[in-house]
Image (cartoon, rainbow, N blue to C red):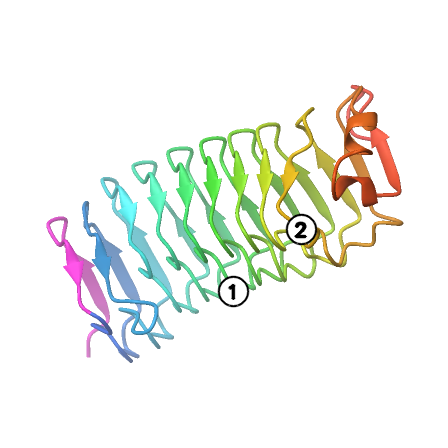
Amino acid sequence: GLTSVTIGNSVTSIGESAFYKCYGLTSVVFNAENCTSMGSSNYPVFYDCSNLTSLTIGENVKTIPDSAFYGCSGLTSVTIPNSVTSIGNSAFRYCSGLTSVTIPNSVTSIGSSAFSGCSGLTSVTIPNSVTSIGVEAFSNCSGLTSVTIPNSVTTIDNAAFSECSALTDLTIGSSVNSIGVSAFDIARLERIKVLNPVPPTCVDNTVFKSVDKENCLLIVPHGTIDSYSTTFVWWDFKRMKEDNGQGDI
């Protein structure tokens, strides 16, 4: 049976469920430079290809299409080349075997549910080129213990990190000015460090919904404690300290 597939650089679309239940498929080389359509989240291209363990993404690929590798639970690591500028909606959704992913600093946007349900991820590095993190982008990534949102990001969308049940440590970069509904509805958060001297706008009071605001330490930039303690949602945190510039508290 079919064990490996190479998707050529001129391919622009792949039909729904194209490799459905190809249990013999173990490796895929994806070279499609301008593929814009790849199945759907209802009928992913590689749905139920549970033995697919090797994925190579070619050096000239610009976009990882929506739903591209949805449900490829056998993948343990993925290297995204630095030609890629956007990661599509649900691109790696339910890739539950992924333990690490390297996102290059060419990527500017991470789509909705792009890594949702990647429960095996223990760490993710979001590069300083990403400006937006989509709805539920990292939801249900129950293995993540710490996350740093880089200074390039301006918007964290609704439920972006919801159900990240092991997350204890969070750093929110200096350009984040808007945080969506339930973005960090995470009970185990122990420490949040915010780098923007202007308190980001929290869309509503569910942003940090289940966080223990009596005990979670909120670290804010030097000279901004008055501003944070009089701003909607941030004022709920009872343990607030300023960063004294001497490194982490």
Residue neighbourhood size for the residue with mark 1, other residues' Cα within 10 Å, grouped as few (<14), some (14–19), many (≥20): many
From the top left corner, tell me how far across and down residue 52 is, in percent: 34, 68
Nearer to the camera, 29 or 18: 18
Residue denoted by label 2: 207
Q: Quadrant location of the N terminus?
A: bottom left
Residue 131 coordinates in the image, percent (x, y):
46, 35
Q: Which mark is residue 117?
A: 1
- Disc 2 vs disc 1: which is toward the camera? 2
Residue depicted at 61% across the width and 32% down the height: 173
The mark total stands at 2
Q: Mostly what secondary structure, the magenta segment?
A: loop
Residue 115: horizontal and vertical position, in percent? 47, 57
Q: Earlier in the sequence, mark 2 or mark 1?
A: 1
Q: Residue at x 30, y 53 (%)?
A: 56
Residue type at mark 2: give it: Val
Q: Residues within 10 Å of mark 2 (few under 14, many from 20)?
A: many
| Residue 188 x/y as whole percent | 76, 57
For the residue labelled by badge 1, is the local secondary structure a helix, a strand or a loop? loop
Start-end of magenta stretch? 1-15
Q: Reply above or below: 226 against 202.
A: above
> Is 12 a magenta residue?
yes
Which label was assigned to residue 199?
A: none
- Work out which quarter of the rendered image holds the C terminus and state it: top right
Q: Is residue 180 left or right of residue 90?
A: right
Spatial separation of the CA atoms under disc 2 and disc 1: 20 Å
Would residue 83 be found to the left or right of residue 215 on screen? Answer: left
Which residue is located at x 37 percent, y 45 percent? Answer: 80
207 or 108: which is nearer to us?
Answer: 207
Question: Is residue 91 magenta-colored?
Answer: no
| Rendered residue at 28%/46% (across/down) | 63
